[in-house]
């Protein structure tokens, strides 16, 4: 097994472990919502980017997919979940700054993987596309989740 596959399996297991670790404290409903909403939209957008030929994933542990389900359905949703957890009580300015930090780390990691491995290959994609799209994605998902969590709970209305 090549070094790239080992990296992918380590990321897969690490992502799953971090996911379950992230669910250790309430409100679990909010954490799961963050995870699943992110995965849903990331998968759609990821497939669109790969199908347009902007980037590719030459080495994968999921050979029946052109996109990266590992990133779109595990790693990115877990990172988004953690971002939501760490900004749960932050102001708008606070989660914008924290989003910048998370996005920077993710973008640097992707650039290093693109440069030194065959895990991701930029065709017409640029590092700043990742930075801008991930940052905007984080902020939109964070705002959406805050909006959803502020909706009145139907069970609390007490229609007796």
Image (cartoon, grey):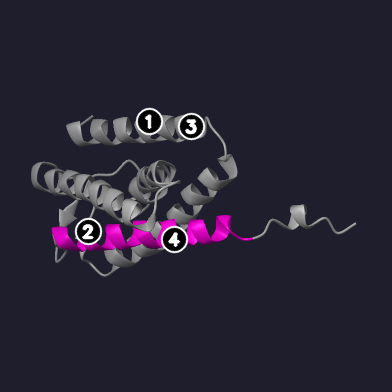
- State the residue position of label 3: 20
Q: Is residue 10 magenta?
A: no
Q: Give the farthest residue toward the bottom.
A: 52
Going from N to C along the chain, the mark reached first, 3 or 1, is 1
Which residue sits at x=33%, y=47%?
Answer: 71
**Can you give x and y, in whole percent of width and height, for residue 16 in the image?**
43, 34
Magenta residues, start to end:
127-151
C-alpha span from label 4 to label 1: 29 Å
C-alpha span from label 1 to label 2: 24 Å
**Mark 2 burial class by Cα count in 10 Å: few <14, some 14-19, many 20+:** some
Of 23 and 10, nearer the camera is 23
- Location of the C terminus by quadrant is bottom right
- State the residue position of label 1: 13
- Horizontal side, residue 26 vs residue 20: left or right: right
Q: Under tag 3, what secondary structure? A: helix
Q: Quadrant of residue 130?
A: bottom left
C-alpha span from label 3 to label 2: 26 Å
Going from N to C along the chain, the mark reached first, 4 or 1, is 1
Q: Give the farthest residue toward the right.
A: 160
Of 26 and 67, nearer the camera is 26
Going from N to C along the chain, the mark reached first, 3 or 2, is 3
**Can you give x and y, in whole percent of width and height, for residue 57 in the image?**
24, 51
- State the residue position of label 2: 130
**Mark 1 burial class by Cα count in 10 Å: few <14, some 14-19, many 20+:** few
* Dot in front, 1 or 2: 2
Of 15 and 63, nearer the camera is 15
**Mark 3 burial class by Cα count in 10 Å: few <14, some 14-19, many 20+:** few
Which residue sits at x=46%, y=29%?
Answer: 21
Of 91 and 37, nearer the camera is 91
C-alpha span from label 3 to label 1: 11 Å
């Amino acid at each position: 097994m090549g070094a790239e596959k080992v990296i992918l399996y380590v990321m897969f297991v690490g992502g799953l472990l971090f996911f379950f670790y992230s669910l250790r404290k309430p409100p679990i409903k909010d954490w799961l919502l963050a995870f699943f909403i992110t995965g849903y939209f990331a998968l759609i957008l990821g497939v669109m980017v790969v199908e347009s030929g902007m980037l590719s994933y030459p080495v994968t542990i999921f050979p029946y997919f052109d996109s990266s389900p590992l990133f779109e359905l595990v790693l990115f949703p877990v990172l988004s979940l953690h971002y939501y957890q760490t900004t749960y009580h932050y102001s708008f300015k606070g989660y914008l700054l924290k989003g910048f930090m998370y996005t920077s780390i993710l973008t640097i990691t992707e650039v290093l993987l693109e440069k030194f491995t065959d895990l991701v290959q930029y065709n017409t994609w640029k590092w700043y596309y990742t930075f801008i799209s991930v940052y905007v994605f984080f902020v939109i998902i964070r705002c959406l989740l805050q909006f959803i969590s502020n909706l009145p709970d139907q069970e609390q209305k007490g229609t007796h």
